[in-house]
Image (cartoon, grey):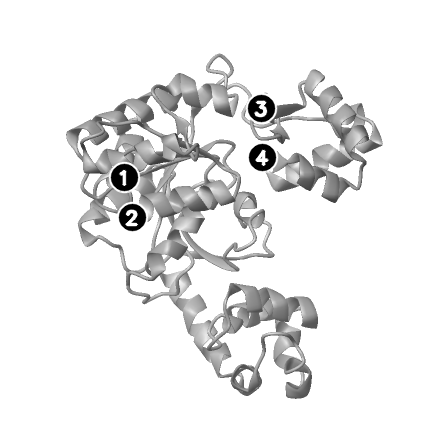
């Protein structure tokens, strides 16, 4: 067993150490292994590390826990991906509060060129289900991965429709990999594995689906998708939380409008009314915003930009957009590139004319799909 991976996992079992402190400790010490070799006095000088946490690291008891976890993962045919691994989803790496580790089961492609999240209420109506069915059927041509949360209602309907149309589907769980929740969906999960889909969670084995795990689960759904579609949702609830998170990640959020007298259309209508979601009445709305051409669907799945064809300054901007893998505000481009606003505007216009970048509302830019 790779020692540094063992110690990386062991850090996650230290009481009081979450994603931020894991990254903080490794940043200060150089590696997970070095964290456990660092004297207590030096650990205490690291911001966020107190007496209890430093003592827990020094005694090393969590290493044995990590060994058992790796054995459990092997038995459950589950991969453990760390933030530093090449296989870690690039979409998640671009968000500030990304999980520092993930448990993944199944052969799903975590770097798939196109991903769409479909979420909504657990009390789905016939209207909501009909919209999911139409959406997934229309998305089939784009060969997307459908992402949802395995919950009752809209979520499970999205997974099932993905299977029906032979699309891979990924379920993000709020429990450990060994606890499928709801249990009634175990048969659907088996079919997902057979169809190049899978499960993903940041929770250790044995973690129960307690309520406080689901808001954290929602940020993974938001981070993993290129487009997030809210089909039905009340004004308060997990779907609206996920939409807010997706907006904070500069993801494209869509909402299907509904009857103004229906509770489970209130959330969607509010998102649209407050400009926090694009109005979605057909697949054409999504194709327009996402710049997904139905004619080229399935032919070219990834942007194939050759940096050698651009100037050094243009290359710098393209590299920033490629690393972000999401829409970027012009102010962020200016800050990261160090370019003056006038120069930046001129370069972006040139790149747009070369069909290398796409301009979005709100002075945002991203790599153009080809």
Q: Please give the label number shown on residue 327.
A: 4
Name the residue tied to disc 2: 237
- The quadrant in which residue 366 appears is top right
Tell me how far mark 2 sits from mark 3, CA to CA. Answer: 33 Å
Residues packed near mark 4 inside 10 Å, few (<14), some (14 to 19) or many (20 plus) = many
- Image coordinates for residue 41, horizontal then vertical, percent: 67, 87
- Mark 1 element type: loop
Lateral position of residue 104 relative to residue 17, left or right: left
Q: Residue 5 carries which label?
A: none
User: CA gap, disc 4 to disc 1?
Assistant: 25 Å
| Residue 242 relative to residue 133: left or right | right
- For disc 1, the marked residue is 233
Disc 3 or 4, which lies upstream in sequence? 4
State how far apart marks 2 and 1 are (Cα): 7 Å
* Alpha carbons under labels 4 and 2: distance apart: 26 Å
* On-image quarter of the N terminus: bottom right
Q: Which residue is drawn at 40% across and 41% down?
A: 243
308 relative to 21, above or below: above
Instruction: Report if residue 327 is visible in the image.
Output: yes
Q: How many labels does the image show?
A: 4
Q: What element carries label 2?
A: loop
Q: Residue 369 carries which label?
A: 3
Question: Quick one: label 4 or label 2, which is nearer the N terminus?
Answer: 2
Q: Which of marks 4 and 1 is in front?
A: 1
Comes first in the chain, label 1 or label 3? 1
Q: Which of 206 and 97 is in front in this view?
A: 97
Residue 306, horizontal then vertical, whole percent = 73, 26
Q: Earlier in the sequence, mark 4 or mark 1?
A: 1
Q: Residue at x 67, y 80 (%)?
A: 45
Please give the name of the residue rendered at 72% of the width and 26% of the height, measured from the top-left corner.
348
Q: Residue at (59%, 38%) from the top-left corner?
A: 325
Q: Nearer the viewer, mark 3 or mark 4?
A: 4
């Amino acid at each position: 067993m790779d020692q540094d991976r063992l110690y990386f996992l062991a850090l996650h079992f230290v009481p009081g150490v979450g994603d931020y402190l894991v990254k903080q400790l490794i940043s200060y010490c150089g590696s997970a292994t070095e964290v456990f070799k660092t004297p207590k006095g030096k650990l205490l000088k690291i911001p966020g590390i107190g007496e209890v946490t430093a003592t827990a690291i020094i005694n090393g008891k969590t290493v044995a826990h990590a060994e058992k976890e790796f054995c459990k993962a092997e038995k459950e045919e589950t991969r453990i991906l760390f933030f530093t691994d090449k296989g870690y989803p690039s979409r998640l790496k671009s968000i500030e509060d990304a999980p520092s580790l993930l448990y993944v089961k199944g052969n799903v492609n975590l770097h798939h060129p196109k991903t769409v999240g479909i979420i909504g209420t657990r009390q789905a109506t016939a209207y909501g289900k009909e919209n999911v069915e139409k959406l997934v059927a229309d998305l089939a041509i784009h060969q997307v991965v459908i992402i949802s949360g395995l919950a009752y209602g809209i979520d499970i309907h999205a997974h099932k429709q993905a299977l029906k149309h032979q699309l891979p589907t990924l379920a993000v769980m709020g429990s450990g990999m060994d606890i499928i929740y709801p249990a009634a969906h175990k048969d659907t999960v088996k079919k997902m594995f057979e169809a190049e889909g899978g499960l993903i969670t940041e929770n250790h084995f044995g973690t129960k689906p307690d309520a406080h795990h689901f808001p954290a689960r929602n940020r993974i759904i938001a981070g993993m998708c290129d487009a997030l579609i809210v089909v039905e949702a009340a004004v308060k609830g997990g779907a609206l939380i996920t939409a807010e998170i997706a907006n904070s990640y500069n993801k494209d959020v869509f909402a299907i409008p509904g009857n103004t007298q229906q509770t489970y259309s209130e959330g969607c209508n509010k998102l649209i009314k407050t400009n926090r979601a694009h109005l979605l009445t057909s697949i054409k709305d999504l194709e327009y915003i996402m710049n997904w051409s139905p004619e080229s669907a399935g032919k070219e799945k990834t942007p194939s930009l050759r940096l050698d064809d651009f100037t050094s300054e243009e290359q710098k901007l393209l590299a920033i957009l490629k690393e972000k893998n999401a829409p970027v505000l012009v102010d962020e481009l200016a800050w990261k590139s160090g370019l003056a606003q006038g120069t930046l505007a001129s370069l972006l216009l040139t790149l747009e004319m070369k069909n290398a970048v796409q301009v979005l509302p709100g002075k945002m830019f991203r790599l153009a799909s080809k």
